[in-house]
Image (tube, helix red, strand yellow):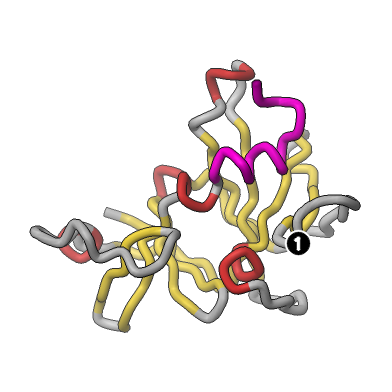
Amino acid sequence: MVVLMCEAAGGRLAILVRDVVEVIARPHLQPLAGKPDWFAGLFAYRGRVTPVVELGRLMDGDVRPPMWSNRIVVVRVRETAAESGREKLVGLLVDRAAAEPMDEQVLNPAGDSANRVVPWGATRLDDRGMFCALELTSVLTPERLLALFPGEHG
């Protein structure tokens, strides 16, 4: 199995590659007034206006300056695909993203179904320490999606 390992709020995160469309360098982000503080801005991704969530700010509320190592992980939002007939894309602003192979037993250890100490997903251990197996539905909740795509939910 392959995951995208990245960092946000000083912690390591694993995102399943099946949910990732592309990883790109941080583009210029267009801010919008009236959005939540975790909203980093909008950018044009392959002809589509795409909102970006600043994961670090969402996780711990801290403001971080832009860095060369910032990446935008473009992910599919599956929950809303049927509503509009088109899948929605959201960018996740992270740091130091890289694809890595991961043993299925590390990501989903047998007999460990309740090791959830953070709201974003299960906490796991690998040879480099702890990481969070990020669950996109826990990050991109219906309320957050409504803030990102106002007027597109019924």
The residue where tag 1 is placed is: 37
| x, y percent for residue 67 | 72, 78
Label 1 residue SS: loop
Name the amino acid type tagged 1: Asp
| Residue stretch rendered in magenta on the structure | 141-154
| x, y percent for residue 106 | 20, 66
Residue ID at (54%, 44%): 141
Verify whether residue 105 appears in magenta: no
Give residue 101's quadrant in the image.
bottom left
- In the figure, 93 relative to 16: above or below? below
Residue ID at (79%, 54%): 41
Residue ID at (59%, 19%): 83
| x, y percent for residue 118 | 40, 67
128 on left or right of 87: left
- In the figure, 29 relative to 67: above or below? above
Give residue 150's quadrant in the image.
top right
Residue ID at (54%, 39%): 76
User: In the current view of this chain or complex, which residue is farthest to the right?
Assistant: 33
Give residue 13's quadrant in the image.
bottom left
